[in-house]
Image (spheres, rainbow, N blue to C red):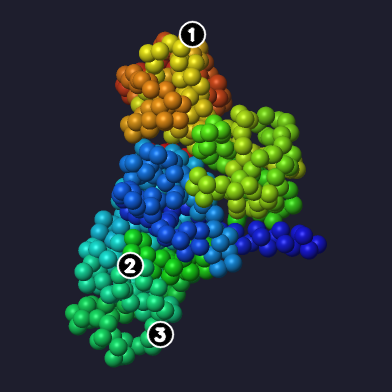
């Protein structure tokens, strides 16, 4: 019984969350500060490292460090205030948003990062839509308050109107930019004075706005505006509702500066107070609860060559219920056979430690010799099948070539492994076969990363992208929803990685023509319940 209670206690202290934002809002910087407060690192890094500067911990790929952007999701586990935090740092750039969408399927909540000057930007809207679809609770962190930005009330209105979600500010800025003097904690009635970078002074308790110390802290005009705004909030807002937050209807909002490491710990304290632990997951028609006896999980990410010395391949499994134990045998639903999870790790970005155990809410990486695909489900009891993870429909297509014919097999291996990872999608011409697949991506930058990784990780210099005049990919189904091969007017019916028929076309007009010629067939995406645009 003690062992069961210990396992349940471990599960209940898990908090698994993702950070979403538009590029350049400060997401990776915030990640660095969070793991700093979690005690994992003694020094925070720069997103784009200057000479001699420490690089960001969560950006582990060489290209990430060079370009100063996150290209792939990273997994970071740390402890904070007796809770075990599983932080999923995701790419913000739209060309890598499929990786972000998959990662959100592994999260129980999200932190939405807003730039105080730019407000709600395009990628933030798209990622918010996914969170709403997944019914993820969202906590908002409004960043860069040490810089000039939009008036706080204007920003809160923008968030509410743009995203159709109520905000509940728990802290409020005292001025912005050059006049930024600190934050007021509305719920605890205390002040955090801003004194520059890495300010960790204790909060100052203040009972009312009649306190004469306000005149010491704020210039008269800033004080007047600040008090008016806080009194307006106090009068207009209803008390905070934890139930509405968990339902995704209300977002607590906190202000601060990730770069200056100001009020990040305050945000984190509120976040862990309200963020949910592991929730139930739908298994076909039933629900699997995190405290269920059997171990269950699903693969949401595959990463090749994290350790290039060993040419490894890691499948990242979100543990949904029970406890994982290294070396355990599990049922693999898609393969319909039993496999052993012998080598397992948990991560801080690329760094890893052997994981002997993991609990519901955790992310565990298992060494994979080719058994896993994204979306695969495993269990120690009855077979499980969680909901499918959507794939984006690619819009850019090419074939890859290399001048040296002796390196062709090596190129084919690179394409195959990167496709299994989910970095690219491949489509096979049944006449040519899999020796020369068509490669599909969502955004142009993915081709840049593809060439870089082929050269950097596979030592294949001189690989070339040969663009194809294709922009549309559609999967044909009949009225019963079954995939079909016989398409009137289609010269080639390709096969995707799961051997499903797919039509590749030059433009939307060609698709309209095919639809007229095949009125009994629907040309759609592999997933019909969630449209990713």
In terms of secondary structure, where does tag 2 sit? loop
Q: In which quarter of the image is the C terminus?
A: top left
Quarter the N terminus occupies: bottom right
Q: For residue 187, which quarter of the picture?
A: bottom left
Left or right relative to 529: residue 144: left
Q: Which of marks 2 and 1 is in front?
A: 2
Q: For the residue carrying disc 1, how many other residues have a C-alpha within 10 Å: few (<14), some (14-19), or many (20+)?
A: few
Q: Residue furthest right?
A: 1
Mark 2 surroundings: few (<14), some (14-19) or many (≥20) residues within 10 A:
few
The residue lying at 53 percent from left, 33 percent from top is 309
Q: Distance between the residues labelled 2 and 3?
A: 22 Å
Among numbered discs 2 and 3, the one appearing first in the sequence: 2
User: In this rendering, is residue 525 above or below 274?
Assistant: above
Q: What element carries label 1?
A: loop
- 47 to 39, vertically: above or below: above
Instruction: Name the one closer to the observer, 495 or 268.
Output: 268
Distance Cα–Cα, label 2 vs label 1: 62 Å
Q: Mark 1 points at which residue?
A: 431
Image quadrant in which you'd find residue 312: top right
The residue at the point 51 percent across, 62 percent down is 39
Q: Which residue is drawn at 49% across and 47% down?
A: 349
Q: For numbered disc 3, what is the local secondary structure?
A: strand
Instruction: State the residue position of label 3.
Output: 205
Q: Identify which residue, 461 or 378, lies in the foreground.
A: 461
Write down the residue under mark 2: 197
Task: Locate residue 322, reporting x and y percent.
Answer: 70, 52
Q: Which of marks 1 and 3 is in front?
A: 3
Q: Please say whether residue 179 is visible from this viewpoint.
A: yes
The residue lying furthest to the left in this view is 221
**Between marks 2 and 3 in the image, the one whose residue lies nearer the viewer:** 2
Seen at 73% across and 42% down, the residue is 328
């Amino acid at each position: 019984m003690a062992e069961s209670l210990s396992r349940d206690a471990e599960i209940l202290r898990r908090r698994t969350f993702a950070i979403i934002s538009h590029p350049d809002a400060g997401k990776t910087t915030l990640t660095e500060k969070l793991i700093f407060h979690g005690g994992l690192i003694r020094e925070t890094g720069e997103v784009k490292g200057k000479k001699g500067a420490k690089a960001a911990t969560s950006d582990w790929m060489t290209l990430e460090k060079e370009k100063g952007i996150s290209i792939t999701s990273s997994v970071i586990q740390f402890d904070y205030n007796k809770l075990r935090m599983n932080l999923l740092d995701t790419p913000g750039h739209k060309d890598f948003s499929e990786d972000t969408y998959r990662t959100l399927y592994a999260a129980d909540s999200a932190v939405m990062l807003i730039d105080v000057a730019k407000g709600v930007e395009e990628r933030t809207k798209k990622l918010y839509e996914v969170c709403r679809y997944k019914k993820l609770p969202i906590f908002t962190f409004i960043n860069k308050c040490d810089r000039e930005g939009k008036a706080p009330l204007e920003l809160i209105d923008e968030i509410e109107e743009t995203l159709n979600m109520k905000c509940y500010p728990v802290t409020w800025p005292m001025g912005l930019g050059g006049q930024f003097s600190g934050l007021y904690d509305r719920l605890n009635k205390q002040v955090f004075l801003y004194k520059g970078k890495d300010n960790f002074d204790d909060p100052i308790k203040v009972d009312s706005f009649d306190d004469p110390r306000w005149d010491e802290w704020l210039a008269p005009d800033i004080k007047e505006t600040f008090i008016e705004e806080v009194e307006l909030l106090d009068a207009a807002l209803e008390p905070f509702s934890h139930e509405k937050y968990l339902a995704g209807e209300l977002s607590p909002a906190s202000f601060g500066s990730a770069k200056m490491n100001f009020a990040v710990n305050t945000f984190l304290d509120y976040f862990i107070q309200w963020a949910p632990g592991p929730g139930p997951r739908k298994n076909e028609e039933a629900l699997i609860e995190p405290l269920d006896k059997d171990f269950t999980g699903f693969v949401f990410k595959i990463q090749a060559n994290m350790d290039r010395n060993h040419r490894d391949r890691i499948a990242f499994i979100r543990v949904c219920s029970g406890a994982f134990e290294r070396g355990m045998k599990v049922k693999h639903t898609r393969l319909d056979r039993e496999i052993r999870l012998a080598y397992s790790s948990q991560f801080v970005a690329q760094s890893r430690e052997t994981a002997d155990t993991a609990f519901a809410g955790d992310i565990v990486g298992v060494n994979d010799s080719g058994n896993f695909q994204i979306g695969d489900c495993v269990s120690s009891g009855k077979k499980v099948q969680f909901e499918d993870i959507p794939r984006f429909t690619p819009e850019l297509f090419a074939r890859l070539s290399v001048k040296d014919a002796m390196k062709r097999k090596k190129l084919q291996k690179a394409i195959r492994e990167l496709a299994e990872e989910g970095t690219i999608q491949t489509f096979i011409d049944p006449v040519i076969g899999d020796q020369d697949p068509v490669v599909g991506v969502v955004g142009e930058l993915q081709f840049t990363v593809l060439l870089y990784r082929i050269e950097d990780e596979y030592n294949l210099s001189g690989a070339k992208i040969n663009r194809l005049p294709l922009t549309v990919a559609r999967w044909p189904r009949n009225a019963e929803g079954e995939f079909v091969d016989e398409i009137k007017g289609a010269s080639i019916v390709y096969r995707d990685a799961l051997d499903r028929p797919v039509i590749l076309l030059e433009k939307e007009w060609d698709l309209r023509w095919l639809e007229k010629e095949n009125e009994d067939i629907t040309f759609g995406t592999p997933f019909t319940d969630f449209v990713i645009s």
